[in-house]
Image (cartoon, coloured by chain):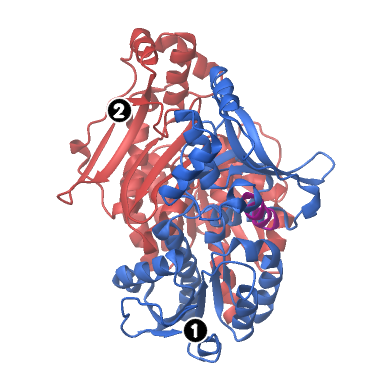
Chain colours: A red, B blue
Amino acid sequence: MPSFKAAILGFGTVGEGVYRILQEKREEIRENTGFTVDVVTILVKDKTKKRKPISGVKITDNIRDILDDPEIDVVFEAIVGEEPAYTYLSDAIEKGCHIITANKKMFAKHGPALLKHAEFRNVQVGFEATTAGGVPVIRTVSNLLAGDRIKRIQGILNGTSNFILTKMREEGSPFKKALLDAQKNGFAEADPSDDVDGTDAFRKLMILSSLSFGQQPDWEDVPVVGIEHIQPIDVIDASKGDLRYRHVADIWIDDNDKLLGTVGPVLIGANHPLFSIDGVDNAIIIETEYLGQLTLVGPGAGMYPTGSAMVADLLHIIRQQEVVMVTN
Amino acid sequence: MPSFKAAILGFGTVGEGVYRILQEKREEIRENTGFTVDVVTILVKDKTKKRKPISGVKITDNIRDILDDPEIDVVFEAIVGEEPAYTYLSDAIEKGCHIITANKKMFAKHGPALLKHAEFRNVQVGFEATTAGGVPVIRTVSNLLAGDRIKRIQGILNGTSNFILTKMREEGSPFKKALLDAQKNGFAEADPSDDVDGTDAFRKLMILSSLSFGQQPDWEDVPVVGIEHIQPIDVIDASKGDLRYRHVADIWIDDNDKLLGTVGPVLIGANHPLFSIDGVDNAIIIETEYLGQLTLVGPGAGMYPTGSAMVADLLHIIRQQEVVMVTN
């Protein structure tokens, strides 16, 4: 039985989600692909932290245990922040590993370089989980690109902001109270600044931009506005006119073939596809030459949705492997 | 330059859409896949019908011109009805062609047999266009299946019905007037029975059932109700309670592992993902073990959306071919 050996960098919510799904679906994956997937090493920050023992898996705080292991075929990365994630993944590619990442901060900036590097080394890069969690927007756009043309992508790319705006409308809460609610429900980090000031949505938009248009606009040229300054009275006034505030990230090619982007709160009416997207969901409208508008809506975060997006990337890589084996 | 030779069965809206997209995107497809795609033969019912001449393409009313041509790699099928479509495609598979179909009536019934036959002959079957037109629901479900589990699929699978229900609500029209409107706008056939009595949605549901659950319920066990008997007063009363009629096809595994399906009008509230789907759009909610709910919304019909779904199937087939070539 051919097998895939995997390492996981980071064992927070997302890393653990990947591990659990690979365990729970071990048999199905074997049946569907003909491959077993074994997680052999997990990189953690603090090795002394108490955790349930995981049988057959090496827990390490030394990246060399992964990069120097010739057996490892694929590296899942679920760390936060640009570094050391970028360096680790770059080294993993160099040694011939496929990589699968959920790290949007790192990928917005270094994604194009990693993809080029991977092409050169003939390995694959999965980044479905960087954008809109469990919503398969990366795969969908990739599939569309070969025979169609993307004209515009707009979406609600940050679940925390959307949860807060929903609370403000439904309960008339001020921003700070809605944010506290989000934190209590596990929908916002202790430091929520990247989520509420638009930075997180901006990064995901840049990832979508590279994928859809083969380029990103100059980052300084994209206005990025958050939701911190929206007042309850604004939200209530909007509701009276049957309008809703949504925090929308938007990127499109204008009539002069210029790539333009914006991120910020937008007032939208009841016929807009984003009007009814409440709570922590993400939603993406893909506008193409042939399809018109295609809208995807689903969970933008969470252990299982994000973990399953990363596992889906792996299965895609394995299926290509499968074809190769069958034909040899 | 490796090339793919294609035949198209049927040159109505969908068949012509496929042809046009393949012409318009010829260069992009070549750049993206390394293959040129040449349409060499088109099967029509009436060869004497006046049409614009198509250079380099043989127009025929004899299926043997396609089945006996050893050069053809892929057959696009865009005929209406079970036969002769099923026989043609079965013969095409037997001679080693990939097939790509938009024929939901044929595929709901014969899809499982065609897929088995194709597996045996080591060719592929594309059927994205059979269900929800340009919305990539087949590809999305296929991708989810390997590492996740589908629990339920519900959706608006017939754009004609949805257009009529929308008109009845927005304009207070009776069913017959709304149907006439749909016909005038090109959103309903001269004989609209399959669309308005639920049969068309039922067929698409059976295709989704085979794909998602590996089986279909007994057809007689699925209650199928259309929209013909909904009165304007029903629609208006619903609106007063902030409810809307949607024609919903629904299939799920119950707690006893039994596969159940229904097709018919349902009253839904403002928080339901199908509430805001107006006009000819289709929408599908995929409920899985890991993702929760994923919703896809987009054009359920039309020359370019449906044609592009078929071309996307072809590109998927070609990409697998590509991997094979690279590794040999």
Q: How many marks?
A: 2
Q: Which image quadrant for residue B41? A: bottom left
What range is drawn magenta here? B201-210
- Residue highlighted by disc 1: B61
Q: Residues within 10 Å of mark 1 (few under 14, many from 20)?
A: some
What kind of residue is marked 1?
Asp
Is A113 magenta? The answer is: no
Q: Nearer the viewer, residue B113 or A130?
A: B113
Closer-to-camera residue (A11/A233): A233
Q: Are marks 2 and 1 in contact (CB under 8 Å)?
A: no
Q: Residue at x 45, y 75 (%)?
A: B322
Residue furthest to the left: A256
Identified by mark 2, the residue type is Gly
Residue B60 on image: x %, y %: 46, 85
From the viewer's perspective, is B171 left or right of B89?
left
Of all residues, the one furthest to the right in this rendering is B256
Residue at the spot x=66%, y=69% of the render?
Answer: A2
Which element is circle 2 on? Answer: strand
The image shows residue B316 at horizontal and vertical percentages of: 49, 67
Q: Which residue is mark 2?
A: A264
Q: Residue at x 43, y 81 (%)?
A: B4
In the foreground, A324 or A84 = A324
Q: Quadrant of residue A224?
A: top left
The answer to whether residue A134 is visible is no
Q: State the SS at label 1.
A: loop
- Taking the image as drawn, is residue A219 in sight? yes
Between residue A263 and residue A303, name the one nearer to us: A263
**Image quadrant for the N terminus of chain B?**
bottom left
Residue B263 position in % (x across, y down)? 68, 43
Disc number lying in front (2 or 1): 1
